[in-house]
Image (cartoon, coloured by chain):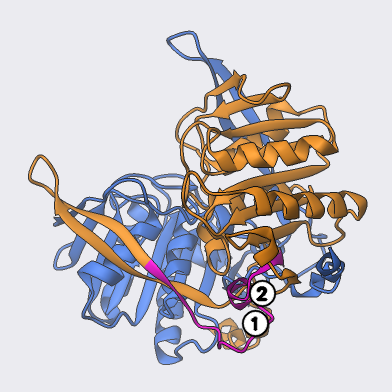
Chain colours: A blue, B orange
Amino acid sequence: MILITNDDGIVAPGIKALVEVAQKFGEIVVVAPDSPQSGQGHAITLNQPLKLRKINLFPGVESYECSGTPVDCVKLAKNVILKDKVIDLCLSGINHGANASINIIYSGTMSAAMEASIEKIDSIGFSLLDFSFDADFSAAKFYVEQIIRSVLENPMKGCKLLNVNIPAGRREDINGIKVCRQGNGTWVEEFQVGTDPRGEKYYWLTGKFVSFEPEESSDNDITALKNKYVTIVPSGHDLTSYNSIKEFKYLETL
Amino acid sequence: MILITNDDGIVAPGIKALVEVAQKFGEIVVVAPDSPQSGQGHAITLNQPLKLRKINLFPGVESYECSGTPVDCVKLAKNVILKDKVIDLCLSGINHGANASINIIYSGTMSAAMEASIEKIDSIGFSLLDFSFDADFSAAKFYVEQIIRSVLENPMKGCKLLNVNIPAGRREDINGIKVCRQGNGTWVEEFQVGTDPRGEKYYWLTGKFVSFEPEESSDNDITALKNKYVTIVPSGHDLTSYNSIKEFKYLETL
């Protein structure tokens, strides 16, 4: 059984592309947000109930739209919809837009996959470096299919989460796949400031991603994507900065 | 300049306790959500504008409530409110409830501190192991003060984020401080199922935290908290599973 979700919402073309590929590998169930949830990170809905609606969007595929976040979708899939079934693989995406580098933390797509990986389910988040609604997913679908097949043939061991980013463009322009680390970069933000119809000031987040990786580095997803490689970052949820435990041991003497 | 935020909302007693302690160390500014934001993780608000309101809640302290998530609060503080100032320290909390183990990923309190740490600001998230609104923060305040003083005297080096959890109860019942790793545990979830006033089915998240750490382990926050230690986990935002890069190198041959 393959569980499919995303953060762009169940009507996004990216999840349709993912369903079309995943269907080749066996039974799938789709549980995805009923509205766009980009930037929702690992948010869960605690203070209000969730709604779940069975819908007929993908021919022959059991599908549900959910009022919650991407992580809520995975929790509902595992604990309610597929309670008595074994989920062999969780696929999230294909995201409209990159989730490389630090974006893994902000991304609902990657957080949904991470939630499944916390449950020890092999999980892959896929993202295409094209934000547009009518992005061309044909090259992405080729790589998504190869990667799903390989992971089904070689189940993951300790690490249960892959962050896959795919360059925009044609398949013949992609140079191959790099398995690498999360690149070092951040967002430089500004807020668009305006006045709403009632005369109140508002702030609307905008920003530009900045890489801290030197041009010549090749072991990280930022530069590998620039060089037109599909990137795969094996990822986890242990945020401990192990190298720094010693630095802060002095605090034990307080 | 010390920036203070939280995820329980600006009127929560926990942030008041934190303000009272932090005031002793110099100028502070509070930017916190105008409503409870527990479980918001690293969510940011992309699809709608944010409102910011200057309020007079803490005597003599410049304070703002924000309509967004905890991470939004930090972004607005850095890029709008304190644009021309240096933030020496970001403090988040004191959270009503634990943020040990995997909870760092779901917690708005910890995500706010992490957002500041991404901006290379020394950051600390504080949580008390008591969910109640009228929790007793007196023992917590003692440790919070010690830790803030130490970090101001010894600025952080590579690692810019500390996850501090404080046992509930009296100060004399706490055995000291442990600097340790994130404990291994997860949530076993159920959904409360009900019917809303319009006859529609709803699902409401509930669950129980389960530790995977053996009783005798002592190098992690779960067991150290059980043993009545304040825990400090140096944390980061690089999610790469470095040990697994080799395992997945075979994918480069696709």
Q: Nearer the viewer, residue B83 or A13?
A: B83
Give the residue at the far right of this rendering: B153
Residue at the location (62% across, 28% down)? Answer: A191
Residue at the location (64% across, 62% down)? Answer: A225
- Which region of the structure is painted magenta? B208-234
Q: Quick check: B116 above or below A204?
A: below
Q: Nearer the viewer, residue B205 or A249?
A: A249
Give the residue at the far top of this rendering: A199
Q: Amino acid at mark 1?
A: Ile
Q: Is residue A66 visible?
A: yes
Left or right: A243 with respect to B30?
Answer: right
Magenta-drawn stretch contains A118: no
Q: Position of residue B232 (x, y in %)?
A: 71, 65
Task: Name the subunit of mark 2.
Answer: A
Local packing at callout 1 (Cα closer than 10 Å; few below 14, some 14-19, many 20+) is some
Q: Amino acid at mark 2?
A: Cys
Magenta-drawn stretch contains B233: yes
- Disc number placed over residue B245 in the picture, else none: 1
Question: Which quarter of the figure has residue A109?
Answer: bottom left
Q: Position of residue A144 (x, y in %)?
A: 43, 72
Question: Which quarter of the figure has residue A183?
Answer: bottom right
Q: Are marks 2 and 1 in contact (CB under 8 Å)?
A: yes
Task: Name the subunit of mark 1.
Answer: B
Secondary structure type for disc 1:
loop
Residue at the location (68% across, 74% down)? Answer: B181
Q: Quadrant of the N terminus of chain B?
A: top right
- Disc number placed over residue A180 in the picture, else none: 2
Left or right: A252 with respect to B34?
Answer: right
Q: Quick check: B221 above or below B74?
A: below
